[in-house]
Image: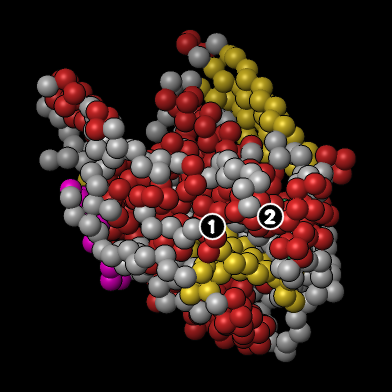
Amino acid sequence: MADWWDADGRRHRKQFSNAPAAREHEHRETALAHAERASREMKLAARSSGGKKARAETNHGTNHGTMEPAKGKLGVMIPGMGAVATTFVAGVEAIRKGLAKPIGSLTQMGTVRLGKRTDGRSPKVKEFVPLAGLDDLVFTGWDIFEDNMYEAASNAGVLDYRLLEQLKPFLSSVKPRAAVFDHNYVKKIDGPNVKKGKTKMDLAEQLRDDMRDFKKTSGASRLITMWCGSTESYIEPTEAHQSVKAFEKAMRENDEMIAPSMIYAYASLMEGVPFANGAPNLTVDLPVMLELSRKNEAPICGKDFKTGQTLMKTVLAPAFKARLLGLSGWYSTNILGNRDGEVLDDPGSFKTKEESKLGVLEHILQPGLYPELYGNIFHKVRINYYPPRGDNKEGWDNIDIFGWLGYPMQIKVDFLCRDSILAAPIVLDLVLFLDLAKRCSELRGLGIQEWLSFYFKSPMTAPGLYPEHDLFIQLMKLKNTLRHLKGEELITHLGLEYYD
Ligand SMILES: NC(=O)c1ccc[n+]([C@@H]2O[C@H](COP(=O)([O-])OP(=O)(O)OC[C@H]3O[C@@H](n4cnc5c(N)ncnc54)[C@H](O)[C@@H]3O)[C@@H](O)[C@H]2O)c1
């Protein structure tokens, strides 16, 4: 009998009669665990809310469900046309024109190994699964400011002026639609390009009209919504978020616990359009959105792009755990001077971001399992708005670890990164993978796309399931999901067969 998992995703261990049997089992189990997890969790997610599409048995040679081809244009709709959104759209256009390379994008540059190491089969991701091509992407967006994408990109100051000049006609043609906005949720900014409506339901209807209009005018055959708007003030779920019925009633009553990002998400899911959340806001991380997503077969994922400091954290922390090095403290501080930094200077917005950044260590290090190593960690995250740096963030980490016999050591990381340069390829991959999920019979009814955890600081999971934060487990989960969908064998890294 192997280990088993209960309905809450907890693992139960088999008891072994002797140590060699236990070691033998452990050896096989670690290699297989990652591979099996992707399909098991998809099954779990489907089962936990009624399970209409669970066909996630471990596969060997069977195609799982159908994947419709990526025919026609894919319309990308972006609430929030700021630094990330413009760097992404400008980047796509620069790549299409042959002016730059899609560095950092798994869908464009990554490969998937298939079969044995000796088989020599490693197709590009974009050749392995039917993704939309970059030439088929068309864009629209909403913002509280009236700047078109060229003006917004120039203001964001991320991309070089000479590159932007070459893209000017295209970028100038993407103009923001009027936003659904509430200053109470983003205290540091205000702008003129905002929709008016008697109730939040009216505003949702206006957004749905925008979506239909964009689909018609752009000729897109499919749509996707990617939240790149500001971080909203911290809130916790209430009764209003527990079901579609309660949420719709609350929208008609202008319940203040319904944030603007939720209105975009509702509109999108009602239109059957997948929604990705790049900010740490609750947005789709709510029972109402899961219900809508599953009902309308509009996949969701989030939240908060994993770009700079948290990317480093989810690489280093697994290494400490792998080597059983203890951790006593991790102090992270950032300075950044873009508009995102300004918004995060407000305590309400910062709290939302802080929650998203803090969860990572606990889930990776599992203090419950390793109390002597990780039971007493001081973890602090700071973000300081410092205008001279613009989008070029500096993230410092001071890490206090301890080793053999408890001897202390320190690690210092100083990441001089570019926030939006790190975020843009994530946006591209999410757009293409969420569109794939929508075209894939096995994925589109699942709601949360946990296989996309790789891209998020605070990955969404099925209710009751803890998130996987380790970057390399996340990558394995993602690639094994692609293998699974195509009926290829999952890669376990067991490798004993090479020594038979
Ligand atoms: N850049 C990164 O590395 C990174 C990483 C993780 C998360 N994020 C998140 O991504 C989001 C975008 O980051 P950015 O650097 O582009 O910020 P930004 O401030 O440059 O852009 C956000 C834009 O959203 C607009 N906006 C705010 N509320 C809106 C609404 N309700 N409707 C429409 N537009 C609205 C603002 O006017 C602004 O133009 C932020 O929430 C940020 O926290 C960014």
Q: What residue is shown with label 2?
A: 90
Residue at 47%, 38% in the rendered image: 471
Asked whether, in this view, residue 58 is left or right of residue 102, the answer is: left
Disc marking residue 264: none
Asked whether, in this view, residue 325 is left or right of residue 103, the answer is: left
Q: Image quadrant of ligand 1?
A: bottom right
Res. 375 in view: no
Q: CA distance from mark 1 to mark 2?
A: 12 Å
Quarter of the figure with residue 443: bottom left
Pick the front one: 221 or 394: 221
Q: Quadrant of the C terminus?
A: top left
Secondary structure character of the magenta stretch overall: loop
Q: What residue is shown with label 1?
A: 134
Residue at 47%, 30% in the rendered image: 318
Number of labelled discs? 2
Distance from mark 2 CB to nearest ligand 1 atom below 8 Å: no
Pick the front one: 26 or 37: 37
Magenta residues span: 50-60
Pick the front one: 130 or 263: 130
Ranked by sequence position, the earlier of labels 1 and 2 is 2
Query: In the orientation shown, which residue stands out farthest toward the right?
Result: 388
Counting other residues with Cα less than 10 Å from the Cα at mark 1, is it few (<14), some (14-19), or many (20 or more)? some
Residue 189 on image: x %, y %: 83, 63
Residue type, mark 1 in image: Leu
The vertical placement of 114 against 58, above or below, is: above
Q: Quadrant of the N terminus?
A: top left
| Helix, strand or loop status at disc 2 | helix
